[in-house]
Image (cartoon, rainbow, N blue to C red):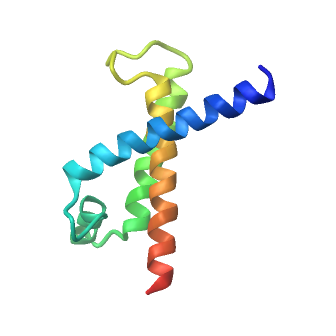
Amino acid sequence: MIQQEFLKHFKKTLDDNFAIVEKKNADYSTDNEAFLNFKACEAFNIPVETGLIVRMCDKMSRISNLMNKEAAVKDESVLDTLQDLANYATILKVYLEHEKKK
């Protein structure tokens, strides 16, 4: 793959990831609290950051398993799971930046 193709594909992946986050955030949050579903961890004395890291670990385990076998759930491939992992990492980054501003 040449660099131009790589960059084009990389940008499309980021755009696709944004579209997924946009839709899921609309389902899991409110206009006043973008991190609503992640803050639910706090009800169990689990910091938001830890909750996100646990979700990322779940995705890493799934990726590791799917690298060796086909997914039983057909609409959650290794590529989908990689998108989820990238999105959770980005959400954690945004959350940490937001908290730092407080």
Residue 79, above or below 95: above
Residue 101, above or below 75: below
Q: Outermost residue toward the top?
A: 70
Taking 30 as reference, is 23 left or right?
A: right
Q: Nearer the viewer, residue 1 or 82?
A: 1
| Picture coordinates of residue 4, whole percent (x, y) | 75, 29
Q: Nearer the viewer, residue 73 or 26?
A: 26
| Picture coordinates of residue 45, whole percent (x, y) | 29, 73
Q: Outermost residue toward the right?
A: 2
Taking 24 as reference, is 50 left or right?
A: right
Residue 97, above or below 37: below
Q: How many marks?
A: 0
**Which quarter of the picture shows residue 34?**
bottom left
| Picture coordinates of residue 42, whole percent (x, y) | 27, 71
Residue 10, above or below 56: above
The residue at 55%/17% (across/down) is 68
| Picture coordinates of residue 29, whole percent (x, y) | 22, 59
Q: Nearer the viewer, residue 85 or 72?
A: 85
Q: Quadrant of the C terminus?
A: bottom left
**Which quarter of the picture shows residue 70?**
top left
The residue at 80%/23% (across/down) is 2
The residue at 71%/25% (across/down) is 5
Q: Quadrant of the N terminus?
A: top right
